[in-house]
Amino acid sequence: MFALFAAIGLVLFGLLYLVNAGPTKRAFGEVVYIGTVASGDGDTPILRVMLENGNELQVAGHRSAFRGCRIGDQVEVISRGLRTTLGAAGCSAFRHAMPVSSERTACERVVESVVQAGRYTRNIINGCGHASDEDAPNYFVVRLNTHCREEICGSVLLGWFAVNKQSGRVFNWDVGEGQVAGEVASIEQQ
């Protein structure tokens, strides 16, 4: 019986060693995706990080490890053996302004923000339309649309948003007043 427990202990120690073996590698990159992946324990939160060298890494972890993370955040990624984690500072310590220079990027930022905030799922979003920025020269004003699944459709509008050109932050847009109406909250801010 002792031999069985010793063998099990040795196997567990070996697996732990394989997961954590090897030199520690540190790299910096930008968060390009925030979501979940199905696992045996339900959905596991993940981040995809585009490294400075152009490679993309997926980092899985507990929701608290990704608290406050946004698309465009600069993060430190630590790899050792088979394990990849965020640096101790997480996302917020490296946050800086991420300018948005195109309507396409503004649309992507809106989609990621509303999905992360839990307002909509990615599969119901069909794309964006854009309004003139005469009333808001510092913002891209974005109309978020859903799919039209009927022969004749009414409105496909999901909402109006404004993306700050300098910071990339996403706000609700009040069409009637022609102004921002509060930042789109992430799940952690709600």
Image (cartoon, rainbow, N blue to C red):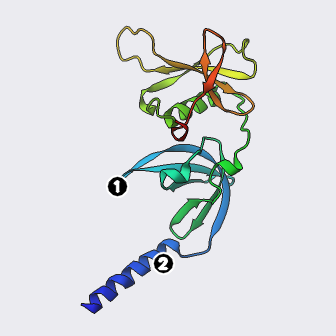
Is 46 placed above or below 127 here? below
Does label 2 or label 1 sit earlier along the sequence? 2
Q: Position of residue 54 (x, y in %)?
A: 65, 51
Which residue carries the number 1 mark? 41
Q: Quadrant of residue 176?
A: top right
Q: Tell me what residue is drawn at x 52 percent, y 24 percent.
A: 127
Is 153 placed above or below 43 here? above
Q: Quadrant of residue 97?
A: top right
Q: Residue flagged by tag 1: what amino acid is it?
A: Asp
Q: Nearer the viewer, mark 2 or mark 1?
A: 1
Q: Residue flagged by tag 2: what amino acid is it?
A: Tyr
Q: Tell me what residue is drawn at x 55 percent, y 35 percent.
A: 112
Locate the N terminus by quadrant. Answer: bottom left
Which residue carries the number 2 mark? 17
Q: Position of residue 167 (x, y in %)?
A: 72, 34
Under circle 2, the secondary element is helix
Is 173 placed above or below 120 here? above
Q: Residues within 10 Å of mark 2 (few under 14, many from 20)?
A: few
Q: Position of residue 185 (x, y in %)?
A: 56, 33
Q: Tell me what residue is drawn at x 70 percent, y 27 percent.
A: 164
Q: Position of residue 114 (x, y in %)?
A: 52, 31
Q: Is residue 172 left or right of residue 14?
A: right
Under circle 1, the secondary element is loop
Q: Tell me what residue is drawn at x 65 percent, y 42 percent.
A: 72
Q: Residues within 10 Å of mark 1 (few under 14, many from 20)?
A: few
- In this rendered view, identify the residue nearer to me: 22 or 177: 177
